[in-house]
Amino acid sequence: MVSRLFVLPCLVGLLACGGGTSEDPPPTGPITYTVAHYDYAFDMQSRAAAVALTVNVDVAGDCMAIPMRAENLSDVRMDGEPIVAGGLDAGVLTACGAGWEAGTQLELTAAMVIPDATWQDSQVGYSVWVDAEDNPFTYLVSWVGGCDRFGPCDNAADQFATYRFTVAHPDDTLVTCPGTITPTPTETVCEFNFAGGPTYSTFGVAMSPSWSTAQVGTWGDSVAVTLYDSPSTGATDRFDEPTHKQFFEWLETLLGPYPYGDELRVIIAPTFWGGFEHPGNIVLADSFTAGQQRNTFHHELVHMWAGNKTTLADTYDFVWKEAIANYLPFVFMHENISASTAISTARSWRSRAQGSDYHLVPGEQPPLIDYYGDVYSPGPLIMFRQLAALFDRDTVLTAIQDFLSDTRAASVEDLKAALETATGADLTNYFNAWIYGSGVPVRPSFDVTITDVGGGDVELIVDEVDNGTGLHGCAFTVRLTGDGGEDFDVWVDRGVDGLATTTQVVTPGFAVTGHLFDPDVQCAGLERQTASASRPLRSNPFLAPVRPTPW
Ligand SMILES: [Zn+2]
C-alpha cells in the first residue's frame, strides 16, 4: 500500500465535497485512527530503525497520540512535513500536523533506536542470546502490548495490520520474519499482507548465522514447510514430520485452511519460552526432548488460528488463546496417539491448577508477565475438558470451531457465547465460579462418603466442601475398588451450576474397600485430603514435574 495522503481536491462550485468546502478550516483536535500498515526498517546489529505508518483517520483532527517506547526518537513527520506540535511524554508520542478529515489516510514517519532491553528476563524486546553453535541469536519479539518497544505502534491487543520489514544484517546470516521473504546478502525484506496479522505476534524478527534451511514436507493442499536449524540442536532429527502433517491436516479440517498462504517456517533457536507463534513463523526452543518438541510445535500451530487469525480483544482475554492451544493437541493426542499420555497431561493441568495466583481472567489486571503463566494448565481443563465432561467433546469442538471462524478480535465473553450456543446452556454461573475473579483462586474440593447399605448396595455421597466461594459445576467418575482388583465406575454429574451434594446408590457386585476420585481428570477440583480409616485416599497420586517456562 502506498502510504500517502489521498484527498481529492475540492473544486469551488461543487456542493458535495467531503462535507466541507475549500474555505473550511482543517480539522483540529485528537484524531481517532487505525494503523493499517507498518513499513519498518532497521539494522539488526546497530538497532537503528525507521518506520512509516499508514494511518486511517476514523475521527477527524490534527493530533494523533500513539504509544512509543523506543530510544532517540527523531525526525517525526506527518505526510512528509515536520510535526508542528507534540512530542514524547510518558511513553506516548503526540504528533500534530495540518489536520485530516475522517476517511482520509496520513503517513506518520519517524526514526529511532530499538532499546537493547527485554521485559525482565524474557526475550520480549530485543535480545542477543548465544546459540548451540556459540553464535549470536538476535531476536525481536513484541508480545501482547509490546510493539511500541520498537517505535510508534498501536499496542492494543485487538489490532491487525499489514507489515513490511526491511532488515539490514551481516553477510552470511539468515533472517526470518512473517510474510514473503526476499533475501539479499546484507538485507532481507519480509512482506506480510495477510488479513490476520496482530501486532503482538507479527512483530517477530529473528537472525542467526548458524541456520541452514531444509524443506521437510508439503502439508494440506500446498503449504511448504521449511526448518531453520543448526547442526548441534538435534531438532531436525526430532521433527516427527508424519505426525505433524497429520495434526496440521486435522486442524485444517476442524478450523479451516491454514491462514498464512503456502509457507510455514519452523525456526529452532535458544528461546526463553518453549515456542512462539509468529504468523507462518513458529519459533521452537532448541533444547527439547522429542515429546516436548512435538507438544510445543502443536501448541504453536494451533495459535495460527487461535491467537493470530482470531486474536485477543484485550490483554486479559489472554487465557482463551492458550487454553485452545493446549486443548486441541490434547484431543489429537487422546484420539490419535496415546490416550494415557493425554490423561497424564490433564493430570498435570489439574496439579498445577491448584497453585495459581490469579484467576483465568484476573479482575485486578496485573502486568501480563506476572499472571500469564497461571492460565496454561487450568485454562484448557476448566474451559474445555470440564465442559466436554458435562456435555460432550464434539459440542466443545463445535464451539471452538465457531469461535475461530473469522479474522477478528475476540474476548472470553465471546468464547462463553460460542460455548452457550453449542451447549444450549447458560454458562453465566459456570464462568463466574471458575474463570472470573480477583485474588488467589480457590479450586473446589469434595468429600466422598461411601456406605454399605446392605443387599450388595453402596451409597455414594459427594459433597462440595464449603470454601466460601460458591458451588462449582463439573462431572467426573468416582471409581469404587475392591481388594480383589475389582472396580466399578460411578458417574457424578454436578451440573454446570454445581450441587452442594449428590447421593447415589449403586450395586458394584463386590465389597468396596477403596476408591479413586476422578481418575480421568475431568474436574479441576480435588478430593479433600483428610485422614479416614474407612475411606482410603488413593486419588491423585501423580504430580507431574513442572516445566519452568510454560508454553
Ligand atoms: Zn501459547
Image (tube, rainbow, N blue to C red):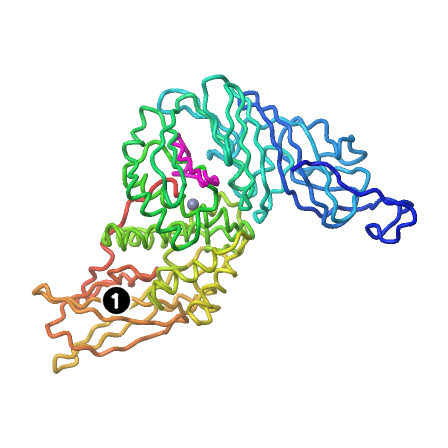
Residue under the image location 75 percent in, 38 percent down: 5
Residue under the image location 52 percent in, 19 percent down: 186
How many numbered discs sit on the rendered protein? 1
Q: Which residue is mark 1?
A: 477
Please provide percent x and percent y for residue 537: 21, 61
Q: Is residue 329 left or right of residue 533?
A: right
Please provide percent x and percent y for residue 433: 44, 65
Ligand 1 position by quadrant = top left
Position of the N terminus by quadrant = top right
Q: Is residue 319 left or right of residue 387?
A: right
Type of the residue with mark 1: Thr
| Extreme residue toward the bottom, this view | 455
Q: Residue 535 sits in which quadrant?
A: bottom left
- Between 12 and 34, the one lying in front of the other is 12
Position of the C terminus by quadrant = top left
Q: Is residue 98 left or right of residue 73?
A: right
Please provide percent x and percent y for residue 234: 29, 29
Q: Is residue 327 above or below residue 224?
A: below
- Between 549 and 24, the one lying in front of the other is 24
| Extreme residue toward the left, this view | 484
Q: Residue 517 sits in which quadrant?
A: bottom left
Residue under the image location 15 percent in, 74 percent down: 508
- Span highlighted in magenta in the image: 262-280
Please provide percent x and percent y for residue 447: 29, 68
- Between 13 and 473, the one lying in front of the other is 13
